[in-house]
Image (cartoon, helix red, strand yellow):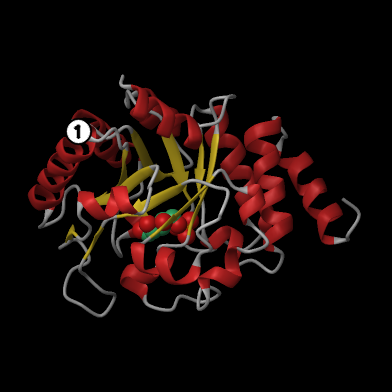
């Protein structure tokens, strides 16, 4: 591996081999998502606890201080919306010149395996990898399901992750599933991070799936709504960070969450 690629990956994946990425890219197809109306304000108290932020060039340029001390994962696919015909019909939206100009440490794009646009999104991934590898920029593939959240089974996610890795993704982001998540990770030859999905009811559910996912081999999370849409985002991210980097159990994370919430930690 070339020095530039190694350097970028080492900024994202920490010395302990783990990572906590904070995505705020949801507006690229959802518009002004709840609690992300002003993304710069949303991330201000959270940035110090994350290992990287994931976002589009528009939000980066307009809402984020260029002096931010954390690396950037640039979302470079899009071209669809929640009111449009098909979320899977994405294209690459950002050039390699822009990726380098914005000093991205990685880029990410979605693949839609099993959709009408499977071929398009997978060949887009392969082309993006070809371009980015020339410049030492890692590509993180996002195994997207569009509106069909029920697709999140181990068999399907394992298929998506393996295909994304085979096409050259350096990291794969996928969903957690209750049954067989270890098979998803085992079948994928590159590091896997867990996406959160829509906000779940209790904070403890988040700690449980993050803890279980890490035990089953994920290197970390790329978790958005289950942090910044929560009532206590700082307490949530600190507790999740403790699971990822300090080997906390879900129960210990819950206890830290309560302490931070009460202003005692
Ligand atoms: C959606 O496709 C975006 O790429 C998000 O970054 C991703 O879904 C992770 O965010 P959340 O934890 O809110 O699902």
Q: Is residue 20 above or below residue 214?
A: below
The quadrant of the picture showing ligand 1 is: bottom left
Q: Is residue 165 above or below residue 128?
A: above
* Relative image position of residue 193 (x, y in whole percent): 45, 39
Q: Is residue 187 above or below residue 157?
A: above
Residue furthest right as drawn: 264
Q: Nearer the viewer, residue 262 or 149?
A: 262
Q: Can residue 143 be seen in this view?
A: no
Q: In this view, does 147 lie above or below 159?
A: below
Q: Is residue 195 visible?
A: yes
Q: Is mark 1 on a helix, strand or loop?
A: helix
Assess disc 1: are there few (<14), some (14-19) or many (≥20) residues with their C-alpha within 10 Å of its C-alpha. few
68 with respect to 231 (left or right): left
Residue at left 20%, top 61%? 93
Residue furthest top as drawn: 1
Residue at left 15%, top 51%? 121
* Relative image position of residue 127 (x, y in whole percent): 12, 42
25 with respect to 165 (left or right): right
* Relative image position of residue 243 (x, y in whole percent): 67, 37
Q: Nearer the viewer, residue 224 or 131?
A: 131
Residue where numbered disc 1 is placed? 134
Residue at left 69%, top 69%? 231
């Amino acid at each position: 591996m070339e020095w530039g690629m190694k350097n970028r990956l080492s900024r994202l994946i920490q010395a302990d081999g783990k990572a906590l990425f904070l995505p705020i890219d949801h507006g690229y197809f959802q518009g002004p998502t709840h609690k992300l109306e002003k993304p710069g304000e949303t991330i201000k108290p959270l940035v110090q606890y994350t290992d990287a932020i994931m976002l589009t060039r528009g939000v980066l340029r307009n809402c984020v201080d260029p002096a931010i001390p954390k690396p950037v994962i640039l979302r470079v696919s899009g071209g669809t919306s929640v009111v449009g015909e098909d979320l899977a019909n994405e294209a690459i939206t950002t050039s390699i010149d822009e990726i380098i100009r914005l000093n991205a440490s990685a880029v990410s794009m979605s693949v839609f395996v099993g959709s009408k646009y499977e071929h398009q999104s997978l060949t887009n991934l392969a082309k993006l990898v070809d371009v980015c590898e020339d410049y030492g920029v890692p590509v993180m593939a996002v195994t997207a399901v569009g509106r069909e959240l029920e697709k999140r089974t181990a068999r399907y996610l394992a298929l998506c992750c393996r295909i994304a890795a085979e096409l050259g993704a350096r990291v794969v982001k996928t969903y957690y599933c209750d049954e067989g998540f270890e098979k998803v990770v085992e079948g994928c030859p590159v590091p896997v991070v867990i996406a959160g999905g829509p906000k779940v009811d209790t904070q403890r559910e988040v700690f449980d799936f993050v803890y279980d996912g890490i035990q089953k081999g994920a290197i970390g999370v790329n978790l958005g709504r289950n942090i910044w849409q929560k009532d206590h985002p700082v307490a949530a991210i600190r507790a999740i960070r403790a699971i990822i980097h300090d080997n906390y159990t879900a129960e210990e994370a819950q206890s830290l969450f309560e302490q931070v919430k009460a202003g005692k930690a």
